[in-house]
Image: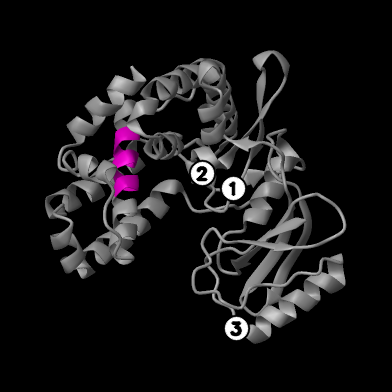
Amino acid sequence: MYKIRINYKINISDTNINKIEKIIFGETGFKIKLLKDRSNLRGKILKTSLSNGKQYFLKLEPINYYSEAETLKGIREISDLPVPRIIWYKTRICKDYRAFLLEGLSGQILNKTLLANKRDFYCIAKMVGQILAKIHSFKFDAQGLLNREGKLRKISKSVDDLVAENLKYSFKIINENYEWCKRNKVDIKESFPYLFDAIDKLRNSTNKKFCLLHGDLKPSHFLINKGNNHNYNVSGIIDWEESTVGNPASDIAHLFFQFEPENVTFLKNVWNSYKKSTDFIPTVRHIANYFLVIFLIHLSYYAEYNIKLPNRMYQLIKNINDIDNITQFLNRILE
């Protein structure tokens, strides 16, 4: 059984869907039937019966979007990080999209591993901190990724440029959804000027030697294998479509934002392991700034799709007007 996934950013006509199915079958032998109902593609897993038991993932991405496939190729060329192998890549499969097939990796996602092995969370945290430091060990003087021949492969804008764009979009969405804000008691207009000022400060203070960033670190993007005698290893780091370059504080803020408050001890151990494994340690203030930005981007998602805020987001709103409160919150984890 193969698992086939569609990138949620796409909006493709039935004619092009049929064309894509034929091209993939003709070039790979994969007989794939894509769903016709594409109203909600995010996170959708499609299955089709094929000859062996391996898992493969199909991704389609817009031509004008930075290529996850190119990023994965570059990472595999210059490192031994456990990222998926690309077995087929089409730079243009129809007018506006390219496609690629990834070989699935074995392992259990990080949050499920923690739930099933609570006694081992110290060694799991140590391992996660080390692999995060390894990702950030690849540093660049420009916005790109060096391959073995020393050529520069462009992967993305800098993270701060992307953050500034996302902030503008998030503000727009929140302002356009007044009724949602009123219903959910969201009023953060006083924070808007500060947030742009915070990004400008980050731009000016960030070391020009950027590092590789995953861009969307969350527990479900780490795959963990458990061996004998409580030995663990990271068997996969997946979903690099938001990968960029910049300050490592961005990745750390992403990871910490995804964990619930009861995971503070685990995060503290991840941070301690990370600091011992790298000399490129961001300040807590930088992490707090990115944490605030990530919060606002998530807030705009709830507003855009008219979703009631979870309790955790309400708790964060209480601190949204004061960066010092967020810094103090993170200091309790990181110091």
Q: Pick the residue in front: 139 or 322.
A: 322
Tag 3 secondary structure? loop
Q: Residues within 10 Å of mark 3 (few under 14, many from 20)?
A: few
Please identify, in this view, whether the residue under mark 1 or under mark 3 is nearer the observer: 3
- Is residue 213 visible in the rendered image? The answer is no
What mark, if any, has residue 13 been given in the picture?
A: 3
Locate residue 301: give its quadrant: bottom left
Amino acid found under the numbered disc labelled 3: Ser
Locate residue 260: give its quadrant: top left
Locate residue 225: give its quadrant: top right
Q: Residue 303's spot in the image, x, y percent? A: 28, 62
Tag 2 secondary structure? strand
Sequence-wise, the earlier of marks 2 and 1 is 1
Amino acid found under the numbered disc labelled 1: Gly
Label 1 vs label 3: CA separation? Answer: 33 Å
Q: Residues within 10 Å of mark 1 (few under 14, many from 20)?
A: many
Label 2 vs label 1: CA separation? Answer: 8 Å
Count up the numbered dots: 3
Which region of the structure is painted magenta?
A: 287-295
Label 3 vs label 2: CA separation? Answer: 34 Å
The residue where tag 2 is placed is 245
Could you tell me which residue is drawn at 57 percent across and 30 percent down? 113
Pointers 1 and 3 in contact (C-beta within 8 Å): no
Q: Residue furthest front?
A: 116
Q: Residue 120's spot in the image, x, y percent? A: 55, 17
Pointers 2 and 1 in contact (C-beta within 8 Å): yes
What secondary structure prevails in the magenta region? helix
What mark, if any, has residue 144 been given in the picture?
A: 1
Q: Pick the residue in front: 320 or 263.
A: 263
Q: Residue 20's spot in the image, x, y percent? A: 72, 76
Please identify, in this view, whether the residue under mark 2 or under mark 1 is nearer the observer: 2
Amino acid found under the numbered disc labelled 2: Val
